Image (cartoon, helix red, strand yellow):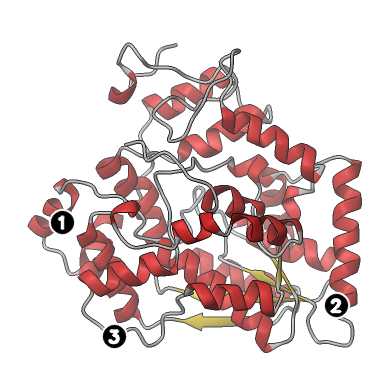
């Protein structure tokens, strides 16, 4: 089968022989067998973390013991960031099943769907887990989002990722908690390509300073030295249990529905309207970036989807767009139809055209190598932030 997306029709087109990543993916390299470096990264992570095998089970068992010891005589022994999605909801279930005492932490950017909000309420109440929520001022977050639109960069929802991370660190520090659990699975979600998308606290601040209008009072950004405080001074560890476990998202959904009345929101990243807009509309229509290939490639690698079927879905089926989503975003951004079309038609720019901490992270690579091996930063941070990347467009 030959893909039909316009970007793949050149004579130089090449696709991985194992997954569905093609040579439009930034920083991609193929070996002599035609297999891409992202497949190799997946294999290396499985070997390192023992994903789904006895090595991984022993490693996560040791981590659980460490969490319990560090949290002894405290009300909570870990923080779990929650969004109402599958992975974070199941993480709460998993934590309780393993005798942990989690504090659920939610950053509310005021774009949650009603389903996501109800999912968080259902699972925390049924598991008797306390919920710590930071709600940002909606005018501030809208101003940040609009500044990213006007900057013509793709990372419009990066502020949510930074803010959730900062909120989890703040909650952990407030309650003396030394471990943060994140519900990320490279087996189920794949590995994000290195290079085209990037964000950090300086990037968000610099974009907003240039294009925003409001003073930020409630938004929890994370400047460099604040980040260093959390990881090197406070030594709050970030653990991704699914990197060690035989985690299955579809099985998790079934359990969550049966035990907690959890509702499916229709797809990955669709529990939040801005995140859904980013993945369904903004990335593919303005930047020709379709991140469904991350999950589809992962399904092919782990044998849950036929490679030809994944190629067909990715190249021949457009991303799902929730009815009324674009109108909702226009209203929140106060864009007229003409202003929205102008933004979408403007020439794309990229993160390396604005100030970031990227070069600083690269210079400090030896330090972050030590920090990732100590679980103080995820290895994905080390891989993405601490090495030079190609800026393929």
Q: Residues within 10 Å of mark 2 (few under 14, many from 20)?
A: some
In the rendered image, the quadrant that contains the C terminus is top left
Q: Earlier in the sequence, mark 1 or mark 2?
A: 2
* Residue indicated by mark 1: 340
Front position in the image: 251 or 223:
223
- In this rendering, the answer to whether 342 lies above or below 137 is above
Question: In the figure, is residue 318 to the left or right of 91?
Answer: left
Q: Residues within 10 Å of mark 1 (few under 14, many from 20)?
A: some
Q: Is residue 155 visible?
A: yes
Q: Is residue 183 visible?
A: no
Front position in the image: 209 or 162:
209
Residue 351 figure quarter:
bottom left
* Residue indicated by mark 3: 215
Question: In the figure, is residue 203 to the left or right of 227?
Answer: left
The residue sitting at 32% across, 11% down in the picture is: 11
- In this rendering, the answer to whether 295 lies above or below 359 is above
Q: Earlier in the sequence, mark 1 or mark 3?
A: 3
The residue sitting at 22% across, 70% down in the picture is: 210
* Residue indicated by mark 2: 70
Q: Position of residue 201 (x, y in %)?
A: 44, 69
Q: Position of residue 252 (x, y in %)?
A: 71, 50
Residue 142 figure quarter:
bottom left
Q: Position of residue 122 (x, y in %)?
A: 64, 71
Per the image, label 2 sits on a secondary structure element best described as helix
- In this rendering, the answer to whether 61 lies above or below 99 is above
Q: Earlier in the sequence, mark 2 or mark 3?
A: 2
Q: Nearer the viewer, mark 1 or mark 2?
A: 2
Residue 335 figure quarter:
bottom left
């Amino acid at each position: 089968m030959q893909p039909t997306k316009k970007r793949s029709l050149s004579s130089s087109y090449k696709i991985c022989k194992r997954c569905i990543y093609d040579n439009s993916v930034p920083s991609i390299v193929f070996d002599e067998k035609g297999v891409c470096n992202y497949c190799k990264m997946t294999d290396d992570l499985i070997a390192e973390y023992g994903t789904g095998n006895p090595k991984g089970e022993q490693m996560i068992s040791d981590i659980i013991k460490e969490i319990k010891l560090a949290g002894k005589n405290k009300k909570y022994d870990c923080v779990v960031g929650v969004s109402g999605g599958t992975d974070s909801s199941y993480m709460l279930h998993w934590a309780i099943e393993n005798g942990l005492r989690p504090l659920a932490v939610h950053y509310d950017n005021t774009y949650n769907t009603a389903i996501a909000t109800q999912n968080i309420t259902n699972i925390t109440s049924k598991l008797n887990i306390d919920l710590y929520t930071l709600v940002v001022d909606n005018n501030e977050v809208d101003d940040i989002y609009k500044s990213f639109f006007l900057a013509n960069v793709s990372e419009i929802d990066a502020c949510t990722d930074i803010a959730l991370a900062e909120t989890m660190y703040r909650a952990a520090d407030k309650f003396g908690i030394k471990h943060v659990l994140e519900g990320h699975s490279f087996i189920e979600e794949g590995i994000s390509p290195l290079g085209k998308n990037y964000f950090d606290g300086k990037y968000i601040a610099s974009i907003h300073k240039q294009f925003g209008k409001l003073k930020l009072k409630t938004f929890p950004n994370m400047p460099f030295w604040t980040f260093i405080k959390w990881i090197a001074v406070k030594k709050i560890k970030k653990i991704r249990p699914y990197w060690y476990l035989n985690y299955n998202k579809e099985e998790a959904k079934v359990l969550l529905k049966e035990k907690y009345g959890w509702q499916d929101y229709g797809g990955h990243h669709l529990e939040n309207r801005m995140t859904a807009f980013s993945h369904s509309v903004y990335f593919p229509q303005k930047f020709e970036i379709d991140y469904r290939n991350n999950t589809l490639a992962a399904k092919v690698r782990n044998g849950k989807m036929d490679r030809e079927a994944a190629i067909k879905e990715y190249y021949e089926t457009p991303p799902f767009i929730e009815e009324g989503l674009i109108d909702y975003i226009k209203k929140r951004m106060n864009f007229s139809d003409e202003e929205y079309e102008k933004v979408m038609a403007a020439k794309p720019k990229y993160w390396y055209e604005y100030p970031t901490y990227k070069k600083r992270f690269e210079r400090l690579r030896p330090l972050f190598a030590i920090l990732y091996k100590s679980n103080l930063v995820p290895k994905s941070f080390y891989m993405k932030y601490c090495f030079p990347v190609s800026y393929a467009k």
